[in-house]
Image (spheres, rainbow, N blue to C red):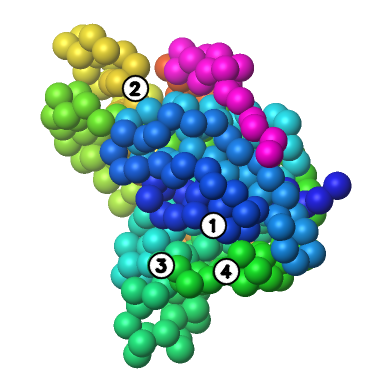
């Protein structure tokens, strides 16, 4: 069986154009804003050594639940060898920000991730020679070392050669996302809910800020023995505030999405502190896993309704084998 490669990313980054060139297809692409309604498509590459390419719905639409459900449908049915996160060429920091959430979703599978940068023909010639080395530095904190750079003029043959080189030694495996990884990509585009959450988030920001400052003052054994209890306390306090927020915001689903977005941002700050305190060690990675599990345990009671909605939606998703 050919190795399966997942194309994922935000709307408008050129995923479907890559799919069409590599598989010699003519699938419709998504547009910015409201996404074109379509399913997931799977087809073998038409050039080079050969692999199976999967084109997904893009993130960033008004209904990320469909996008997440589509990904979960794929993971139920197909073992993945490579995760290609497609981003448009831009300033270095903009490239990172545009795919940061997706990287965090797949962080446990970082060895499978390749960043595919499209529209490189927009790059100023003076930056071209060092671009790949420079952009790699921006992704060091995610421990991602695989990159593909493409331009509009690249043919299907050229793209297949680039993809073949990155997936050559990749092994197929099941992708199993945790609840917090799934929840992390939900988005709320309701301005009223966002505005109502501001007062709550201001209080929570101060609460989490104090906890983070407290953790930075701890070192060695003191840090390892106390960081979980400190974080657990602020999480409990944050859910108390969230309950108060729901008293005047009746849309529990949207409210929780905004709240979980906030918590996910704070989780990333805590993970950075753990990294700073413990460095790139196996023990550090274990503490990061424990921290993510702690967050997941705390949000589970609130997240079950939305997760059930997503899991039900997975049943309605289709995979079209071309």
Quarter of the image for residue 60 reads top left
Precedes in sequence: disc 4 or disc 2: 4
Location of the C terminus (image quadrant): top right
Query: Closer to us: mark 4 or mark 1?
Result: 4
Q: Nearer the viewer, mark 4 or mark 2?
A: 4
How crowded pointer 2 is (Cα within 10 Å; few <14, some 14-19, many 20+) is rated as many
- Horizontally, residue 45 falls left or right of residue 126, namely right
Q: Tell me the residue that label 2 is attached to.
A: 256
Label disc, if present, on residue 155 of the rendered structure: 4
Upstream in the sequence, badge 1 or badge 2?
Answer: 1
- The residue stretch that appears in magenta: 304-322
- Specify whether 230 is left or right of 19: left
Query: Which of disc 3 and disc 4 is earlier in sequence?
Result: 3
Asked if labels 2 and 1 touch by Cβ distance under 8 angstroms, the answer is: no
Give the mark toward the camera: 1 or 2.
1
Which residue is at a point 65% across and 69% down the rendered structure image?
A: 157
The residues bearing labels 4 and 3 have C-alpha atoms spaced at a distance of 13 Å
- The residue indicated by pointer 1 is 18
Report the residue at 45% width, 65% height from top.
118
Q: Foreground: 98 or 66?
A: 66
Compared with 191, 141 (above or below) is: below
The x and y percentages for residue 257 are: 35, 26
Q: Residue shown at 15%/24% (left/top)?
A: 192
Q: Earlier in the sequence, mark 2 or mark 3?
A: 3
For the residues labelled 2 and 3, the Cα–Cα distance comes to 36 Å
Camera-nearest label, 2 or 3: 3
Please say if 215 is above or below 162.
above
**Can residue 271 be seen from the camera position used here?**
no
Mark 3–mark 1 distance (CA, rounded to whole Å)? 11 Å
Q: Earlier in the sequence, mark 3 or mark 1?
A: 1
Provide residue 232's location: percent of width, then percent of height: 44, 32
* Mark 3, residue position: 119
């Amino acid at each position: 069986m050919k190795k399966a490669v997942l194309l994922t990313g935000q709307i408008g980054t050129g995923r479907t154009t890559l799919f069409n060139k590599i598989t010699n297809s003519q699938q419709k692409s998504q547009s910015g804003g409201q996404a074109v309604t379509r399913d997931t498509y799977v087809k073998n590459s038409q050039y080079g050594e050969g692999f199976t390419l999967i084109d997904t719905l893009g993130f960033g639409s008004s209904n990320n639940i469909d996008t997440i459900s589509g990904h979960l449908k794929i993971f139920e049915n197909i073992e993945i060898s490579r995760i290609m996160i497609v981003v448009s060429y831009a300033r270095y920091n903009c490239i990172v920000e545009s795919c940061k959430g997706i990287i965090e979703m797949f962080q446990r599978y970082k060895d499978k991730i390749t960043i595919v940068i499209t529209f490189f023909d927009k790059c100023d010639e003076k930056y071209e020679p060092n671009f790949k080395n420079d952009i790699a530095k921006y992704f060091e904190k995610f421990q991602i070392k695989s990159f593909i750079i493409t331009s509009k003029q690249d043919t299907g043959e050229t793209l297949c050669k680039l993809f073949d080189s990155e997936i050559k030694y990749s092994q197929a495996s099941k992708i199993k996302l945790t609840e917090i990884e799934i929840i992390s990509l939900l988005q709320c585009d309701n301005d009223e809910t966002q505005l109502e959450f501001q007062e709550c988030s201001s209080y929570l920001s101060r609460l989490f800020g104090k906890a983070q400052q407290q953790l930075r003052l701890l070192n060695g054994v003191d840090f390892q023995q106390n960081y979980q209890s400190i974080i657990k306390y602020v999480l409990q306090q944050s859910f108390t505030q969230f309950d108060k927020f729901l008293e005047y915001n009746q849309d529990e689903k949207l409210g929780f999405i905004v709240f979980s977005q906030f918590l996910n941002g704070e989780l990333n700050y805590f993970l950075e502190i753990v990294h700073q305190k413990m460095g790139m060690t196996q023990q550090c990675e274990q503490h990061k896993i424990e921290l993510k599990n702690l967050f997941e345990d705390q949000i589970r009671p609130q997240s079950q309704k939305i997760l059930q909605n997503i899991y039900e939606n997975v049943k309605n998703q289709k995979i079209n084998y071309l």
